[in-house]
Image (tube, rainbow, N blue to C red):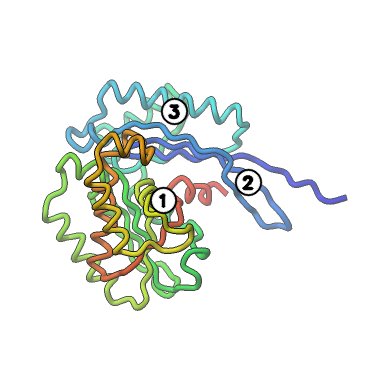
Amino acid sequence: MKNKVVINKVATIDIGSNAIRLLISNVFSINGKIHHTKNSLYRVQLRLGDDSFKKGIISQKNLKKLKSTLKSFKLLMDVNDVKKYLAYATSAMRCVKNSENLVIELEKETGIKVQIISGKKESEIVAKNDISAHIGKSKNYCFIDVGGGSTEVVIYKKSLFYKSKSFQIGGVRLINELVDESTWNEFKLWLKTNAVELKKLKIIGIGGNINKLYKISGVKYTKPLERRKFKKTLVSLEKMSYSKKLVKLKLNPDRVDVIVPAGKIYYFVMKTLGIKEIYVPRIGLADGMVKDLI
């Protein structure tokens, strides 16, 4: 008789600047090796960045939505018999003035303990995802994770962690005109100082917007998206009407206005480093967080 495989469920919650995600994963052990697979994913549109980046607060309206979302996630975890969970908040919550009090309030009212993580930790978590199926045995590679409020960059040199940095450049910040020229210059200088020297460097794009751009471009999964095709896709989207993006491309309303600005950040990195293609493994913070749990 074969040994019975015991499957437990864990959950990871990513509280971003443009949306909140709950990922429920299956965790099991076979021959002493722990595996995890995706069970279900829930995404709720909530643009916390509009409040926090401009005023350093979360409006009562959005706070109410945030609490309701976390309460609903708690119920989903209960009915799915989730054994462990992690809830991480990123750029939008980092910019809230009374964030410590807010975290206490959220746990008291929703039963979810939220941790606000630094941009560096965010980068490290994203980099835990396995991307070997996409880039093969390449030893020099760079993760670019563009969110609503920040862009995280993690560089690996000879397969070992080399450098990482978080920049206050993101899709929601761009549409609110909250990124000045000096921030772009700092970003460019850091990239040129730390990444240009690396031979055969491969770029890995992380985040909902690059995932969607990759799908729209029509590139076969695991194949890289060429810079020329990437530019063509961005130009085409920029010309497309709001209604066409909703109907033809089936974009979520909260994605329509940020997808091109976010895409331009990835393109900026590629152009700055002279990279001709970007790999898109369709993973994110919530996926990397599973490794933190197991």
Label 2 sits on residue: 27
Residue nearest the observer in this picture, 212 or 70: 212
- In the rendering, at what x and y percent does residue 246 appear? 33, 35
Residue nearest the observer in this picture, 163 or 181: 181
Residue 182 visible in the snapshot: yes
Query: What residue is drawn where x is 22% and y is 46%?
Result: 239
Q: Is residue 31 left or right of residue 2?
A: left
- Residue 227 lies, with reference to residue 28, above or below; the image says below
| Camera-side mark, 1 or 2 | 1
Q: Real-space Cα distance between discs 1 and 2? A: 28 Å
Label drawn at residue 70: 3
- In the rendering, at what x and y percent does residue 207 appear? 38, 49
- In the rendering, at what x and y percent does residue 237 appear? 27, 47
Q: Secondary structure at mark 3?
A: helix
The amino acid type found where label 1 is placed reads Lys
Label 1 sits on residue: 215
